[in-house]
Image: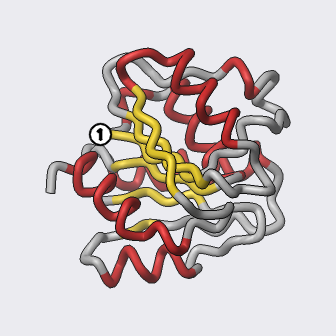
Amino acid sequence: MILWAHGLEGSPEGAKVRALRAAGFEIVAPDGRELPLAARLDGLLAACERLAPQRPVLAGSSYGGLASAWLASQHPERFAGVLLLAPALHWSEPPVADASALVAPAGVNVIVVHGRQDAIVPIQCSRDYVARSGQGATLVEVEDGHVLIASMPAIVAALHQLSGR
């Protein structure tokens, strides 16, 4: 089970969600369109509570990656793993006071996939996050831009690894 946090301009039925479902993943994707970060977090937490006692893999793209990184840091016991796709860790918005200080939660495997040609979120944000996080976080750098649609094989492989499939 994957709990999906879409990006600022994404949707619960976006290209990545469709591709992941086609790859056989069960996805729960709350609709965060036009919501501030705090409201998106509330929606993700509510979805997580509905899934309990199951512990989903939390996955988020861009702004959804920021939401996922913060949510995992606050509630690590709720997630089997975390996948961050070009996470917007250069952006701070309540309740995230300083996104550049976020770290991967201890005891939870985190994989970050980020494109070297990303013109929206600097890849250095992901490099710094992984460096701050230590052994619990892995960075996969890909030859892609921000949308990462050409990197679906790497994303699918990361989700297989995190979900134990």
Q: Residue at x 59, y 63 (%)?
A: 144
- Provide residue 86's location: percent of width, then percent of height: 62, 50
Say few, some or many: other residues with alpha carbon within 10 Å of mark 1 (under 14 / 14 to 19 / 20 or more): many
Image quadrant in which the N terminus is located: bottom left
Q: Height in image: 138 above or below 18?
A: above
Q: Which residue is mark 1?
A: 80
In the rendered image, residue 145, in percent from the top left (x then y), is placed at: 66, 63
Asked whether 31 or 9 is in front, the reply is 9
Q: How many marks?
A: 1
Q: Quadrant of residue 131?
A: top right
Q: In the image, residue 32 lies at what x, y percent?
A: 70, 63
Q: Quadrant of residue 25?
A: bottom left
Position of 79 compared to 99: left or right? left
Disc 1 secondary structure class? loop
State the residue in front, 38 or 87: 87
Identify residue type, mark 1: Ala
Q: Quadrant of the C terminus?
A: bottom left
Residue at 57 percent of width and 57 percent of height: 5
Residue at position x 76%, y 62% from top? 8
Looking at the picture, does residue 91 appear above or below residue 74? below
Q: Is residue 158 left or right of residue 39?
A: left
Residue 126 location (% of width, % of height) = 61, 35
Residue 154 appears left or right of 151: left
Residue at the (40%, 33%) spot, across then down: 138
Question: Which one is in front, 53 or 161?
Answer: 161
Question: Relative to residue 129, is residue 145 depicted above or below?
Answer: below
Q: How is the image coloured?
A: secondary structure
Relative to residue 157, is residue 132 drawn left or right? right
- Name the residue nearer the viewer: 93 or 111: 111
